[in-house]
Image (cartoon, coloured by chain):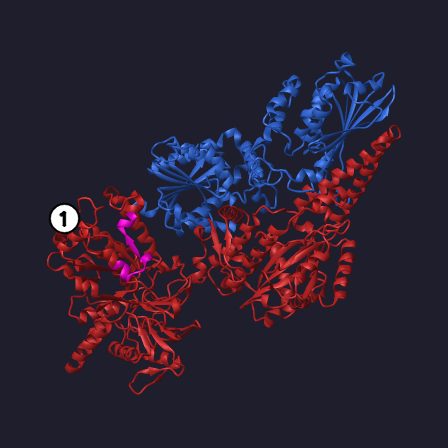
Chain colours: A red, B blue
Amino acid sequence: MTVERKLPALSLVVLVGPSGSGKSTFAARHFRPSEVLSSDWFRSRVRDDENDMSGNADAFEALHFVARKRLAAGLLTVIDATNVQREARAPLVALAREFHVVPVAIVLGVPQRIALERNASRPERVDSEHYVRKQYADLRRSLGRDALGALRREGFASVHVLGSLEEIDGATFVREPLWTDRRVERGPFDIIGDVHGCLAELTTLLDRLGYVVTQSGGRAHPQGRRVVLLGDLVDRGPRNVDVLRLARRLVADGTALCVPGNHDRKFLRWLQGREVRISHGLERSIAEVEALPADVQASFRRESAEFLDGLISHFVLDEGRLVVAHAGMKREMQGRASPTVRDFALYGETTGEIDEYGLPVRANWAADYRGEALVVYGHTPVPRAEWLNNTICIDTGCVFGGRLTALRYPELELVDVPAEREWYPPIRPLNAEGSALSAQHEHDDVLDLSDVTGKRIVESRLFRGITLSESETGAALEAMSRFATNPRWIAHLPPTMSPPETSSIDGFLEHPDEALGYYRDAGVRKVICQEKHMGSRAIVVVCRDADTARERFGVLDDGEGAVLTRTGRRFFDASDRERAFLERVRAALSAAGFWERFASDWFVLDCELMPWSAKAQELLREQYAAVGAAATSALPRVVSVLEAATSRTSDCAPLVEKFRRIASSAESFVSAYRRYCWPVADLGDLRLAPFHLLAAEGRVFVDETHEWHMRTLAELAAVDPPWFVATPWRSVDFDDPKSADDAVAWWRELTERGGEGMVVKPWDFVVRGRRGLLQPAVKCRGREYLRIIYGPDYTADEHLSRLRQRGVGRKRALALREFALGIEALERFVRREPLRRVHECVFGVLALESDAVDPRL
Amino acid sequence: MLLTITTTIRPATDLGFLLHKNPARTQSHELSFGKVHVFYPEATEERCTAAMLLDIDPIGLVRGRKDSHGSDGLLAQYVNDRPFVASSFLSVAIAQVFGSALGGRSKERESLAATPIPLTATLTALPCRGDERLLKELFEPLGWRVRATGRLLDAKMPEWGASPYFDVELTGTKRLSELLSHLYVLVPVLDGDKHYWVAEDEIEKLLRHAGAWLNTHPRREWITHRYLRHQRQLTALALSRLADDGDPDEVALEHASEEAAIERPLSLQERRMDAVLERLREAGARSVVDLGCGEGKFIARLLQERRFERIVGVDVSRSVLSRAKERLGLDRAHSAVAARVELLQGSLTYRDARLSGFDAAVAIEVVEHLDPHRLAMFARNSFAFVGAPVTIVTTPNAEYNSRFEGLARGRLRHRDHRFEWTRAEFRAWAESEARRYARSVEFHAIGDEDPELGPPTQMAVFTSMEKRT
């Protein structure tokens, strides 16, 4: 006898049966081994003997612990234990409720005689007869005659009593998705907020969305789009009955999905004849119903009750990417089923407080929402539909004289129609004084520590799974908190840049051969060589005006842009200086027509700001100039004392020679750093060399070649020379050996003139080689310049030979990750993701920068 | 890098016997940091000069050095002044190459070693932060005439100011061993940098070499303090790479002690803690979160009273927290203290769920370390998220600064202070935040009040309205 039974795909299955009732065999037949948690197994793991009853408490503690992990992960779980006492089952029901899964009981009703026989054949079970008899007594006592009813009363949502061996052997189970699971429905959808009987607005909105009236009086969309109604169809408005009829029609035709609202629920209870308080607009719905002619009224009541009773609390749609519910849905409840989930879908969460209008204060679950799925909901009338942490409330208070709003999915466009009039006076003014900032920006005012610290793995488009250690994020927290500027401005931080492998050419530590070779060997055909300016890295974030700063960056009263150092500090201490600087950049963007050309009111530019001495004053004075001063004052005296000694004892001649060389190196060292220093009296003495046009509205320009960046930014530089510097560059085509020779010659010429060197980049911004992402750039510094990195006398053979032992592997690993994080930050920003998502990436760059890598590389 | 010693005693070439170095040839010694060469640019009956040249290996200093924490070499940069200046390396060289002379021993010229003789010593590039008066204050009480020559940091960049190095000539009639011991101790004292060579026996060395003269030196305390000050644990190098201005912990410590020195006459810190404690007792607080707890001074005070059952200290700096942990003895197992107190790395500008649910939150001398544009976040965090019924904030009263003798006009008390408020400014900020977050606020003075300038420290106590009713 085979009976097919239904089992919710996400449930906690509690097997009930005494020892010897065949639970383990039964479980093995119907479930995967990983799904079954057996008390015997856990007992054997905590005591080495599954029959050692002293291990019971420990075994059940461990079993519950594992069960919790499985349920949190959304996995069906079977409890294989006797569960003959109510006290044993109650915590399991509570567990199922806590994780919003369906508690299912399966009772194995094996006759006591058979259980005793089976136990008797298992000699390892000491005193088993006593136990089995007791278990049967417990079972009878706790379940009584009506096992099904008793277990339902205990809270099991589904109970299977298999009363005989035949029934046990014949049972089969079919797993069914939960009713809320509509992941296979991919849309496209038009999701509509609280209608509240506003029929005219609803039909106008459906028209605007492109739905056409069908013969049955329903609607259909030529492109097969479907409507999702977010509930609260009735109450307060003028045409509650007709809205309900239309909704029923649409759902019946398959044109619409509908979730229930709290008003619908209350209306249903009234329809069912239960006692409800008639208020908050229910009186209007009731009046309409009662005005219907008697025969119509009876069928309307019946059909409406049936329709409303059948609505499902919420839906998970489009492969889990979209969740719709009347009052919202927390991540841990999505796609699950419990009274708590249903209540949350209807009412949301309240804090228990009452506001000045006598309404319950709603807990802002959306503020804490961190889910992947987009949640669209209504319930709380808001002046405008706004995104917050991947959620959006589209109840724009139509019945109170606001608007009826639809969200087109997956386009994420809002379409709305104004209310024809105020149909019901709002209790709380709809347009209560709002913030100048958007909901997301307002919410982002304070970032959460748990979103950045501890060991983290950050996902990025260019590099999967970037791991940040706890000590790295700890160091970044300090740097961010103490020194970095307003996080809203930090939409990007630049990556570190690796030098080439060490050169073997006499007298050189770095040479273009290795830099070019890196890309050639990786299979790149064409690269660009850009002059490396010796200044300070600057990320220039510039808005067209204060409105853009507010609307796009959420910044009030903190400038219309920011100039950032590579660690996210403000470049200029004085805000008037920054303002003047940005004004100059803005003027150039205007003159070059960039605002219009890129249809953007903001830009992020990656630049070098010169002179070096403008920012690095302290470093220069305390390190470089100090070394120069000490060396150039001590060495001439050393040389003269040595020369005096030579006239007496010839054996110090080699010393004279050595220290003459060091003295001359010291002079070269001083000239080397001096080239990058000049006094800055005012803004006009600065030089800005932008080399990446990183991002603008809607775009991160990593899909453009470096040649495009060079040419585009040269246009900008041409507007205001020499303040703006167009970076000189050369291209190298590896199929043309001469072009590489030319680049090397160019580098020699640049560096012999005192230039820092050059940066070699692949022609395309993002390039993958055989072994994954390639370095975004490799720097190749000049021989003279390197004195300020490796010391005045590093070119001496004795030093150079040791300096050649350096490894660039770690530096390159960091460069790739930082590059990926920096770009990811911009891409998230451009997609208007919450600040914490952008911040996570730039925080990651800082975290990686705290890594102990040879700072001279 | 160069020390010369000249004498005009007759025969001057006896200097060779005193130093145990033959004037006829150049002698080189291998030391851990490089080579030391000793040679004589002049050696006549009338006048003899010995030169000690430190040939420091700049690459060796950086490479392959691991400090006790296993992190990178002590010198983070190849570009550093060590090879060219008179530093603790010179002391090492004196001890190892002129060891007998430093000890006053000479096999061949025993009595000469014990006799004051005319001596002139020159040092190139002796670091001295401050001006040459300091050099005189250090060497003149020991019987030396001091001639110091300074120069510009960079002749082409006059706006960068003076070089911190002096060429120094000391002249006097002293025993050679005295000269060497003075240099042995005072060169590292003048050099602001760390002693890369020091071991645990630093105090012993100081006493051995300076015991005879240090006790009567007018700058005795300063010398001892400077000599011993670098024993502190080296701090996270990772951090120094992020902070562009050197080792932030060293700097912060130094700044904190500067601030304490400025405020010392009032023992303001004690009175501040007393005042906050008094308010906490009054409020009946049993759990307290100390926002910006630093090294845990206030936590130590809270621990003395059993009424404070749960104490959490938060600081953004992990190295500061580890010092606090040490100071409070939290690393010792089964400590009764550990059960009541917890230290967390956190930030005043990030929301932190671990910090809610306390009876009181205190931020003692903390807000002034925040950039003004982050104050709004601090307030939202403190009042809306930490949200303790009682929040206490103390901060300097900028008006009072003119009463501090050690503080130049217009300067702030601590180099990391981003601002300091007048009484009116503090009031305005506190009252507006109190309105925004439904708190009542009271102000208290801490320290002796000046009739015009007010108290040195000001305190605001915010109480949530619910708590009141």
Displayed quadrant of residue A385: bottom left
Q: Nearer the viewer, residue B458 or A572?
A: A572
Question: How many numbered marks have been drawn onto this rendered protein structure?
Answer: 1
Q: Tell me residue A831's x, y (percent).
A: 49, 65
| Left or right of A713, for residue B427 | left
Residue A32: within the magenta? yes
Residue A278 lies within the magenta run: no
Q: Which residues are magenta?
A: A26-42
Q: Chain of mark 1?
A: A
Q: Quadrant of the N terminus of chain A?
A: bottom left
Q: Is residue A400 above or below residue B365?
A: below
Do we see residue A701 in this rendering?
Answer: no
Secondary structure, magenta segment, majority class: helix
Please provide percent x and percent y for residue B9.
Answer: 83, 17
| Residue A624 image position (x, y, % from top left) | 70, 43
Front position in the image: B188 or B73: B73
Residue annotated with mark 1: A134
Residue for point 39% across, 79% down: A209
Q: From what the image shows, is residue B366 above or below residue A152?
A: above
Residue A813 or B370: which is nearer the viewer? A813
